[in-house]
Image (spheres, rainbow, N blue to C red):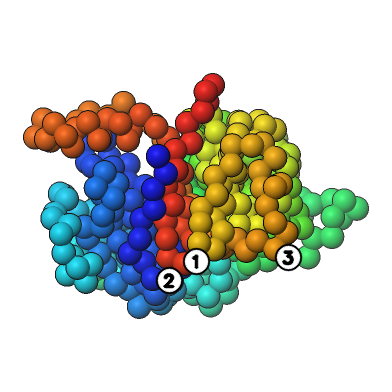
Amino acid sequence: MPFTLRHHTCSVTGLLYWHDPLKVPSLISGDEDGLILVWDLLSRKPYCRYKCKGQIASLQQLNSLLIATCKDHTLRIFNFPSAVVSTNRDVNAFPELNLVYEIPVNTLNFANTALEKVGTNLYRLWCCNTQDSETIDIYEFDLRDSKSLKRIHRAVSLYELISTLVNPSIMKFDKLGTVMKFIAYCGVIYVGFESGFVIGLYLKSELHIAYISSGHYPEPVLDFAAGENLGKVISSSTDSYLGLHSSNVGMISKENFTSDDIIIDDSVIHTERMNIPVAKVSHIQQIDNILVTSSWSGKTELFDLGGENVLAVILKERGQVHVDDNPYGNASLSKNSTKVKICSMVCLPKNDTVIPSCTSEGAARRWIKFCKEAWCLIGYEDGSILAREITFTGA
């Protein structure tokens, strides 16, 4: 059955499902005022918190680390709580997340950040340049040393290189534009730009361009998701299709060349995409052979993996939540209905979890029942988080 989580008092701007089969199913949420909450999804209550000084722009998991990019120009790295504590207390009295590292970052635009582990305690951060949001900075640091942060690439500009590959008779390409999104997938950092280009990068002794796509040109990239069933990164924009992206790291094409310490492995400009009957997709997820999109219209729509068949539509109107399994969605709603704005969305896959032996019988039953379903959790501007099962026959 659907349920709603309530504790935030403003827009829920970030959601993250915590992947750990040995821990109680947990959700991390962040809001416009900088409050981060960790939720026990079985009891449906928060049990840990942290208050930042600015809006939570994005949340990321990397092994046992929680990474929060905040609009106070700071990236914060936390250790995830080792255990669920009592939730019978006021939210302001919850224990705080353990902060282990802070990094100043540029958060003036829409972009998130991407963090990858490159050694035992060594990490690499990809983010917008501190002054120019159209270029990229790359840092490395040792998590044990607060003074180890080192910028190894500064203000990386990709436009000049990419422009030499673009056919001017096909598109007017005068700039890549602002960096909109980062995602790390299978050893490649994919970067989405305001121009609609998606560029895949990786770093060895030199910086490599492994992939280039103009699939959304000239519309901006709004979101990225890992398409595990597709084996590709999925991107969304204001247009009515999704971009599909994959690269072969280390594959050297015949047109390979080097310029300014950047090596282009694959100089082909790709345009693979999937048509969908919805535009202006601000959030996208892909789990259990289901595509889930949330758009500026206030609707969250569930599709089959081909993006053709609508399985369900979820929307929230002022004072109610409307769940419609009719493929035609909200066709019967009044034209004057006011939907609540969607600010974040995440999906949880169903899984065969291993229940720890110390778990009580009642908690074990709830745990097993919860994990047998896939879930979609949607954060709204009114501070509520709607959770709804998304498992369908044949999905």
Which residue: 17% across, 50% down? 84
Does residue 58 appear in this view? no
Crowdedness of circle 3 by 10 Å Cα count: few (<14), some, many (20+)? some
| Mark 3 / mark 1, whichever is N-terminal | 3
CB atoms of marks 1 and 2 within 8 Å: yes
For this rendering, which residue is in front, 323 or 212? 323
Res 157 label:
none
Decide which of 216, 257 is in the foreground and name it: 216
The residue that mark 1 highlights is 381
Give the CA distance from mark 3 to mark 2.
36 Å
**Amino acid beneath label 1:** Glu
Residue 236 spot, x, y in % from top left:
64, 50
Residue assigned mark 3 = 175
Q: Which residue is mark 2?
A: 10
Q: Which residue occupies the extreme top position in the image?
A: 394
* Label pair 3/1, CB-CB below 8 angstroms: no
Above or below, 95 relative to 266: below
- Residue at screen point 17% across, 57% down: 87
> How many angstroms separate mark 3 from mark 1 (CA)?
33 Å
First along the sequence among labels 1 and 2: 2
Relative to 277, is 152 above or below?
A: below
Estimate the x, y position of residue 204 in percent, counting from the top left.
45, 47
336 horizontally vs 95: left or right: right
Q: Which amino acid, by three-letter code, is at mark 3?
A: Lys
